Image (cartoon, helix red, strand yellow):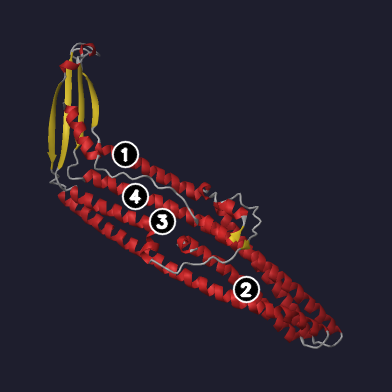
């Protein structure tokens, strides 16, 4: 009878728990990149982010939280213990045994245990969303650094080609100085321009090494990447923007929302902890001379309902309740900050994307116009029809247009990456 009553209350309590299936960890980041660029080795690296040490650390932390959530779930079930006392007489002598089976259960009528469970469940769901967002960030970092290396390799090619032409100009200037056509300072100027170009070539190598270092920090085995890619047509951006829908589609915002929910549940639990606690307790015991004499029919038992009112700790609980109240307010502000950050990030990303498009179109026209001008300028200088300053000026402008075009193309791809990281569903 005792256990029948306990099991009835267990069923009533557990039926009120709102169980939800665990979400999966899918990402559409790679699918977007395939619409933007061609690079099989990059896609292979992105598909392997779940094996990175950072991801595995977060994944196992989440697994630990889920196991602790299972521990919390056992709080809804009765707890019991079997107590076997051996008296102070000689071991197993007559009159030496006392066996007691004790079962107790917190009825949780006020919902204190449910609030604690719901709070920890919300933290688990927040951890799931954090893991989704971490996977997106890892993919973004790999793609960003890969693209950085690829475009700086292109930049090095531009610089190397310019250095070759500047070295040729210096060689011509040196010959003309020998012939008395140019002065010594003009020959030195041509030499310095060639040397500065070589220095820029080395500086570009430092940027490449930095990006490769960032990739190896995530994937130590990725040192053999070729870092080559080709761009496809520019994806189009959807014009209809629902800011609230955009914000709530982000895993990091959903994680902040769940953390706020967890803090609110803890605040409610801290208030309930000051109210009376009701426990259902069942005890069955028997005392015999020897272990062999124990008969189930000899057990005496009773069922008791206990009321506990924590009078002396009410002040302490009041302070805890106030503390949890401020923590819930803090989580509310963090959630609001996450939403505001998403809105600002989306607006910034779209604007930078539009500017990058316009710059790339403008500079592409300039490069085509200057390419022919460089050939003519070098020919005129060799034939003595123009001076050194004029040819160096043309080279400098051409180099500026080439590098700015490459940089603008790089920034356009980065803008698409930022948009894919922030709100992938804005891209058609």
Q: CA distance from mark 1 to mark 4?
A: 14 Å
Q: CA distance from mark 1 to mark 2?
A: 59 Å
Residue 405 is marked as 2
**Mark 4 or 3: the one toward you:** 3
Residue occupied by mark 1 = 71
Of labels 1 and 4, earlier in sequence is 1
Callout count: 4
Asked which secondary structure carries label 4, the reply is: helix
Q: Residue 312 in the image: x percent, y percent?
A: 14, 46
Of labels 3 and 1, earlier in sequence is 1
Of labels 3 and 2, earlier in sequence is 3
Of labels 1 and 2, earlier in sequence is 1
Location of the N terminus (image quadrant): top left
Question: Where, by quadrant of the figure, is residue 291 drawn?
Answer: top left
From the viewer's side, name the closer residue of 217 and 116: 116
Residue occupied by mark 4 = 123
Residue occupied by mark 3 = 251
Residue 427 is marked as none
Asked which secondary structure carries label 2, the reply is: helix
């Amino acid at each position: 009878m005792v256990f029948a009553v306990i099991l009835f209350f267990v069923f009533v309590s557990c039926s009120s728990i709102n169980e939800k299936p665990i979400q999966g960890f899918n990402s559409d980041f790679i699918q977007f990149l395939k619409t933007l660029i061609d690079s099989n080795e990059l896609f292979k690296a992105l598909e392997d982010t779940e094996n990175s040490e950072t991801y595995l650390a977060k994944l196992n932390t989440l697994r630990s939280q889920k196991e602790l959530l299972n521990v919390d779930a056992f709080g809804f079930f009765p707890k019991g213990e079997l107590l076997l006392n051996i008296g102070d007489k000689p071991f197993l002598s007559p009159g030496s045994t006392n066996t007691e089976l004790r079962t107790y259960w917190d009825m949780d009528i006020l919902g204190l245990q449910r609030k604690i469970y719901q709070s920890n469940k919300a933290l688990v769901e927040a951890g799931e969303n954090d893991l989704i967002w971490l996977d997106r960030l890892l993919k973004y970092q790999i793609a960003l650094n890969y693209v950085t290396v690829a475009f700086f390799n292109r930049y090095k090619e531009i610089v190397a080609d310019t250095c070759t032409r500047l070295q040729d100009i210096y060689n011509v200037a040196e010959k003309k100085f020998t012939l008395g056509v140019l002065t010594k300072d003009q020959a030195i100027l041509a030499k310095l321009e060639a040397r500065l170009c070589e220095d820029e070539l080395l500086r570009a190598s430092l940027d490449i090494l930095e990006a490769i270092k960032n990739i190896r920090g995530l994937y130590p085995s990725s040192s053999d990447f070729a870092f080559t890619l080709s761009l496809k047509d520019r994806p189009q951006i959807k014009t209809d923007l629902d800011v609230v829908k955009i914000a709530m589609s982000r895993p990091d915002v959903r994680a902040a929302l769940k953390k706020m929910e967890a803090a609110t549940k803890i605040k409610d639990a801290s208030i309930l902890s000051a109210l009376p606690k009701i426990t259902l307790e069942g005890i069955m015991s028997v005392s015999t001379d020897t272990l062999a004499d124990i008969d189930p029919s000899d057990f005496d038992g009773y069922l008791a309902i206990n009321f506990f009112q924590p009078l002396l700790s009410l002040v302490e609980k009041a302070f805890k309740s106030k503390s949890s109240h401020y923590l819930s307010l803090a989580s509310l502000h963090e959630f609001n900050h996450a939403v505001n950050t998403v809105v600002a990030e989306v607006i910034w990303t779209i604007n930078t994307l539009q500017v990058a498009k316009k710059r790339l179109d403008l500079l592409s026209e300039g490069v085509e116009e200057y390419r022919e001008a460089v050939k003519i300028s070098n020919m005129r200088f060799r034939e003595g029809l123009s001076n050194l300053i004029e040819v160096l000026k043309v080279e400098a402008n051409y180099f500026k247009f080439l590098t700015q075009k490459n940089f603008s193309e790089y920034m356009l791809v980065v803008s698409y990456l930022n948009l894919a990281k922030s709100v992938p569903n804005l891209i058609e």
